């Protein structure tokens, strides 16, 4: 039997893709979660960001502590504000088959510290972050 590759792997000369370099996804929360609770989850998990999922479990964004804290400090703040209602990275996200060089360039161009790595159906596989 001959294995069939469903998606060609793009490489950057090193042969590495986003799938090879990503970290585990970490905490994932629903986009209907209240900002205060999301901030509590983020702090208690001691992570830099949370992945946000839509009602189908697909990745709909990434939110950082700075974004959550900034929202809470705004004059528009309401205790019932949901994650779907605040500004956070909503994509485009990094495909697992994207070359590491291309993914790194996209993160730098968009001035992001991290990006969800998703499969062809939009489910989060992990997170690709810039080296500090």
Image: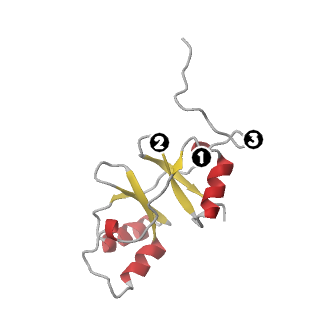
Give the Cα distance between marks 2 and 1: 11 Å
Question: Dot 1: within a 10 Å radius of its alpha carbon, few (fewer than 14), some, or many (20 or more) residues?
Answer: many
Q: Which residue carries the number 2 mark? A: 119
The residue positioned farthest toward the bottom in the image shown: 75
Identify the mark nearer the N-term, 1 or 3. Answer: 3
Give the Cα distance between marks 3 and 2: 22 Å
Q: In screen coordinates, is 9 left or right of 82?
A: right
Q: Position of residue 88 (x, y in %)?
A: 43, 67
Is 13 or 124 nearer to us in this picture? 13
**Quarter of the image where the N terminus is located:** top right
Q: Which residue carries the number 3 mark? A: 13
Q: Secondary structure at mark 3?
A: loop
Residue at image location 42% in from the left, 46% down from the top: 122
Residue at image location 60% in from the left, 60% down from the top: 107
Q: Are marks 1 and 3 in contact (CB under 8 Å)?
A: no
Question: Dot 2: within a 10 Å radius of its alpha carbon, few (fewer than 14), some, or many (20 or more) residues?
Answer: some
Q: Secondary structure at mark 2?
A: loop
Identify the mark nearer the N-term, 2 or 1. Answer: 1
Q: Is residue 66 above or below residue 94?
A: below
Residue at image location 44% in from the left, 60% down from the top: 90
């Amino acid at each position: 039997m001959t294995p069939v590759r469903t998606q060609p792997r793009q490489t950057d000369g090193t042969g590495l893709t986003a799938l090879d370099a990503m970290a585990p996804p970490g905490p994932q929360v629903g986009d209907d979660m209240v900002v205060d609770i999301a901030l509590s989850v983020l702090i208690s998990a001691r992570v830099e960001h949370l992945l946000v999922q839509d009602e189908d479990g697909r990745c709909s964004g990434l939110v950082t502590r700075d974004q959550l804290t900034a929202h809470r400090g705004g004059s528009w703040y309401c205790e019932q504000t949901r994650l779907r209602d605040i500004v956070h990275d909503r994509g485009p996200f990094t495909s697992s088959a994207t070359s590491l060089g291309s993914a790194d360039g996209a993160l730098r161009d968009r001035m992001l510290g991290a990006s969800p790595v998703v499969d062809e159906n939009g489910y989060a596989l992990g997170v690709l972050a810039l080296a500090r």
